[in-house]
Image: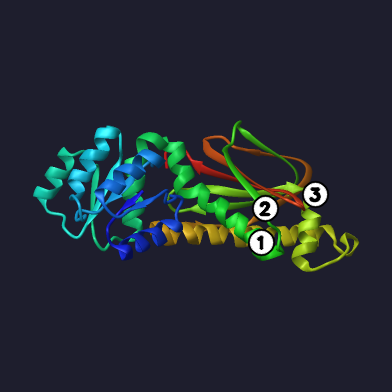
Amino acid sequence: MIVDDSRVSCSVLSEVLAKTNFVVAATANNAGEAVEKYQECQPDVVTMDMNLPDADGIECSRRIRAIDPKARILMISAMRDAALMLKGREAGIGSFLQKPVAPNELLDALTFLCQDQLGHLGELKDLYVKSFAKVLEKGLFSLVGVPSQVTVEVAEGNYLDVNGIAVIIGLTGTPMGRAIVYMDRSTMRQFACALLGKDNEKELSEEEASDAVEEAANIIIGRAASTINDMKEKEMRISPPGTICGASIRIANFKMMSFRVKAETRLGDICMNIGFAEGE
């Protein structure tokens, strides 16, 4: 929830957060409205302006913490001096940023406040995997005009079993890992036809189909890495893709914290396995 009496500030913060995995549940322009809306929507975290028309941000934070002692509050103000921060911490404010706020600073501060709830797996999911999921959904529509229903879950087990095609792309930088785009043979051929503009699967060789999927996977993973770099000021890079086709493919998943992203489409299920090296 965003608490700020400035429409400009609310708009700026909303625009920044729209590009992240945080969702703006509500906005409030004064302390009274903030308390009321906090009770209604129970947000995970609140951004709080200092200067409000009916009370300052510290008093507003006290009122919210009286309702919910576990409330997570980030103060974003033009002022950020030691005395203000001391009073803010006494009121339960967890972190402080000074206007104007850089997008990466905002995201880092919000994520830090929510870490006790997220845990390491949740942190990886919210900071990185959801970006891959969003780009997969947008990429499928832009590349082949196919809408999809995308879900994200933690991948279980030490192996990834694939029956069809798997495109493996390494992720370098921080965190390090790899992304695997995979689908069954029928979906591979339908996807390739849509991408290459062919009306009949018989016009398509196996090599052409696998090459089409490989190129699409490279584009989607590259776009996801660039999105993460823009938001987090990271230097995530991707390695050249390696492609495996077969009736029974088993890929080891040892020492990886992995997530499964599945896009359900009319062509079939198009999946990604995003894995991060443990300890990185």
For the point 62% across and 60% down, the residue is 139
Mark 1 or 3, which is nearer the eye?
Answer: 1
3 and 2 marks in contact (CB < 8 Å) = no
Q: Is 152 displayed left or right of 201 in the figure?
A: left
Q: Secondary structure at mark 2?
A: loop
Q: Position of residue 72 (x, y in %)?
A: 30, 40
Q: Which mark is residue 218?
A: none
Q: Which mark is residue 148?
A: 2
Which amino acid type is shown beneath numbered disc 2? Ser
Local crowd at mark 1 within 10 Å, few (<14), some, or many (≥20)?
A: few
Kindly tell me whether residue 42 is visible in this rendering: no
Upstream in sequence: badge 1 or badge 3: 1
Structural distance between the alpha carbons of marks 3 and 2: 19 Å
Q: Which one is nearer the viewer's eye here, 157 or 173?
A: 157
Mark 3 or 2, which is nearer the eye?
Answer: 2
Q: Is residue 214 above or below residue 153?
A: below
Residue receiving disc 1 = 141
Q: Is residue 95 above or below residue 252?
A: below
For the point 44% across and 50% down, the residue is 23
Residue receiving disc 3 = 185
Structural distance between the alpha carbons of marks 2 and 1: 8 Å
Structural distance between the alpha carbons of marks 1 and 3: 20 Å
Q: Position of residue 75 (x, y in %)?
A: 24, 50
Q: Is 175 displayed left or right of 207 in the figure?
A: left
Q: Position of residue 222 (x, y in %)?
A: 56, 61
2 and 1 marks in contact (CB < 8 Å) = yes
Q: Position of residue 194 (x, y in %)?
A: 77, 63
Q: Is residue 114 above or below residue 1?
A: above
> What colouring does the structure picture have?
rainbow
